[in-house]
Amino acid sequence: MGQKLLCHGHAGHFSHRHGADIHCSKECEEQHHAVQQFLEKALRDTGFNQRKDVPNLWERDGVHISIEEVMREGLDPTLARHREAVNARL
């Protein structure tokens, strides 16, 4: 019985194979990348700046969020939590 891996793109399980990647297929990897690019543009459009030293972190008003958080939880819920965190700092 082969080891099961968890796909980074859609979080479904797939069988381990020689040279396995973090995605279950090339199509899944491409779709995941496209979604990430779309969400990164949305973050830029809403005034976030990507950290150069930690590129998965985005900052606005002194509070950071991660692109993984946005992809996992959704843009609007993440932005709402970000606003709450900014307001808590004031």
Image (cartoon, rainbow, N blue to C red):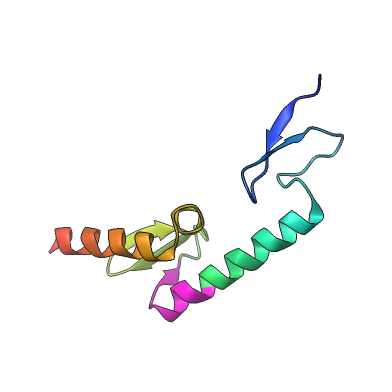
* Front residue of 25 and 82: 25
* Residue found 59% across the figure and 64% down from its top: 36
Query: Which residue is at 65% across, 41% downward?
Result: 12
Numbered range of the magenta stretch: 41-50
Residue 69 x/y as whole percent = 45, 53
Q: Could you tell me which residue is drawn at 75 percent across and 45 percent down?
A: 24
The foreground one among 53 and 26 is: 26
Q: Let me know if residue 76 is in the magenta part.
A: no
Q: Is residue 38 above or below residue 10?
A: below
Q: Given the current orientation, which residue lies at the most extreme top position?
A: 1
Which quadrant of the view contains residue 28? bottom right
Q: In front here: 81 or 19?
A: 81
Q: Position of residue 20 (x, y in %)?
A: 80, 40
Quarter of the rendering occupied by the C terminus: bottom left
Indicate the position of residue 41 as horizontal and vertical percent values.
52, 76
Left or right, 59 with respect to 68, comes to left
Question: As drawn, which residue projects farthest toward the right?
Answer: 18
Kindly indicate the quadrant of the structure image that contains residue 73: bottom left
Q: Residue lying furthest bottom in this view? A: 45
Side (left or right) of 24 relative to 36: right
Q: Please state if 17 lies on the left or on the right of 67 as rendered.
A: right
Residue situated in front as seen by the camera: 77 or 88: 77
Q: Residue 8, relative to residue 82: is it above or below?
A: above
Would you say residue 43 sits in the magenta stretch? yes
Q: Residue at x 84, y 34 (%)?
A: 17
Q: Position of residue 27 (x, y in %)?
A: 78, 58
The mark tally for this picture is: 0
Q: Quadrant of the N terminus?
A: top right
